[in-house]
Amino acid sequence: MKKYLEKLFILLFVSILLVPNYAFADKEEEKEDEGEAVEEKVPIQIYEFYGSTCGYCAALNEYLDSIEEEYGDYFDVVKFEVWSSQENSELMEKAAKVMNADVTGVPFLIIGDKYLTGFEEKDKETIITYIMAEYEKEEYLRYNLLNEIENYDETAEERTKRNNIILTCISIVLVVGTTFVIIKARKED
């Protein structure tokens, strides 16, 4: 009996180690070596989807230009004109899906894992707050929109469903294995 209880303990211990690592593996980030020299931070990428004759877009660009002197070391703007480019329009749709945003017009501004649609006076302070919050993150933790779009192949619901199926299978194997070990131990007693 002791022999089977030891096997049961090992099975449970290994399972406890494997389940959390597997369940959260897609969310883990690789950290840089701590022995490397500290380098100056690179600016964050801001993604702007705009229309060529959009007044709100022009006001946003004017504002971004006005903060360039004070905050220009913290960000670079990557612009995508969507009214005359089908490719950029499709990219905006994908970005909206990745950001889980309901975008019905432009400008659509993405700063890290935050976004703004439209542009009003009240958005000015929010933009600076978002820029500084994203800039302060370690580079490996910064949100990379284009990478997210490239890797976007399933919705969060589909990922959750897939992970639940896998965890259910692992749980079934554990229950069956535990039951087998217990039955086997009882038969030998």
Image (cartoon, rainbow, N blue to C red):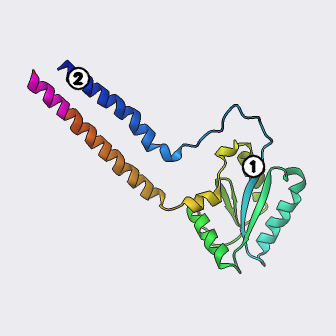
Question: What is the chief secondary structure element of the magenta stretch?
Answer: helix
Q: Secondary structure at mark 1?
A: helix
Q: Residue at x 64, y 75 (%)?
A: 87
Residue 13 drawn in magenta: no
Quadrant where the C terminus is found in the figure: top left
Give the x, y percent position of residue 27: 52, 46
Give the x, y percent position of residue 162: 39, 54
Residue 186 drawn in magenta: yes
The answer to whether residue 122 is visible is: no
Alpha-carbon neighbours of circle 2 within 10 Å: few (<14), some, or many (≥20)? some
Sequence-wise, which precedes: disc 2 or disc 1?
A: 2
Q: Secondary structure at mark 2?
A: helix
Give the x, y percent position of residue 18: 40, 37
Q: Residue furthest right?
A: 69
Mark number displayed over residue 75? none
Q: Which of 133/167 is in front?
A: 167
The answer to whether residue 35 is visible is: yes
Q: Amino acid at mark 1?
A: Thr
Depicted 90 relative to depicted 160: above or below: below
Q: Which of 125/107 is in front?
A: 107
Mark number displayed over residue 5? 2
Q: Which residues are magenta?
A: 180-188
Q: Amino acid at mark 2?
A: Leu
- C-alpha separation, residue under disc 2 versus residue under disc 1: 56 Å
Q: Which residue is mark 1?
A: 129
Q: Residue at x 48, y 60 (%)?
A: 155
Depicted 39 relative to depicted 126: above or below: above
Proximity of marks 2 and 1: CB atoms separated by less than 8 Å: no
Depicted 31 relative to depicted 73: above or below: above
